[in-house]
Amino acid sequence: MARGLNEFKYMTFDVVGTLIDFEGGITACLAEIAAEAGVSIDGEEALALYRQARYMPDANLFPDDLARVYMVIAPRLGLPAEEKYGARLRDSASGWQGFSDSRAALADLAKSHKLIAMTNARRWALDHFERQLGSPFFVTFTADDTGTEKPDPAFFHKVFDFVASRGDSKGDILHVAQSQYHDIGISRALGMTNCWIERRHAQKGYGGTIKPKHFTVPDYHFTSMADFAAAVRESLKERT
């Protein structure tokens, strides 16, 4: 049985996809380029092509890799295969929006827990995302800091080492994320308690996120950050 939501000191968060709407950001930018070129695109098709290109062996760190990804998917979408548009897709990350419930939920959760960001995005992108989210994090870890990307266990062990330096352990952490592939499966394998925020609950498929080989049943499951934060509030009331 999962532990109570009031029993954790820390909450670690995936950022891109859980808190920041990267799918909306990518498809919006591609739609703008398409409109300028006089064509139209299907958003879900674009995300499927993005997903395939993103996980090629020659992929770079995110979101820098979007410049390369664009050149791969543009011909398939009927878009102009020009590097300036790849750079535009990459740079669009600085304007991606948080989900409508992210900022308020994080502000609420930060009152009772230490929030830790764990993102495969590079530091320059997280700087923009943090401003979008109201700078709620106690500490942040990016691919630049860890030298690797989730689901590599080494990323998680960097966070475990930080928590240990404060006299705590991974048992004091609740890991919160939307990606089964990058977060939920590996957090379970590492013995963490996890919470799945199923952002695509009303949509079919995995969108821009790679499909996991095996689905992992999470310890907690919500379809929004608002519902998750509300459950945490109720749990804290029960403790008092």
Image (tube, rainbow, N blue to C red):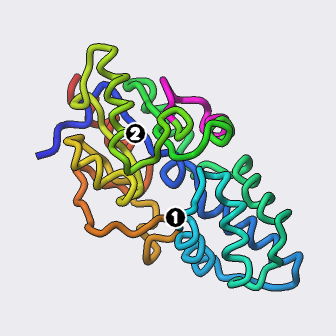
Q: Residue at x 82, y 65 (%)?
A: 83
Q: CA distance from mark 2 to mark 1?
A: 19 Å
Left-right relation of 185 to 107: left
Q: Whole-percent x and y of residue 162?
A: 37, 22
Tell me where the magenta segment starts and ends, as one range: 129-141
| Mark closest to the chain's N terminus, 2 or 1 | 1
Q: Secondary structure at mark 1?
A: loop
Q: Secondary structure at mark 2?
A: helix
Q: Residue at x 24, y 40 (%)?
A: 192
Name above or below for residue 202 compared with residue 156: below
> Do tag 2 and tag 1 residues touch (Cβ < 8 Å)?
no
> Quadrant location of the C terminus?
top left
Q: Which residue is mark 2?
A: 155
Q: Amino acid at mark 2?
A: Phe
Q: Amino acid at mark 1?
A: Pro
Q: Is residue 231 visible?
A: yes
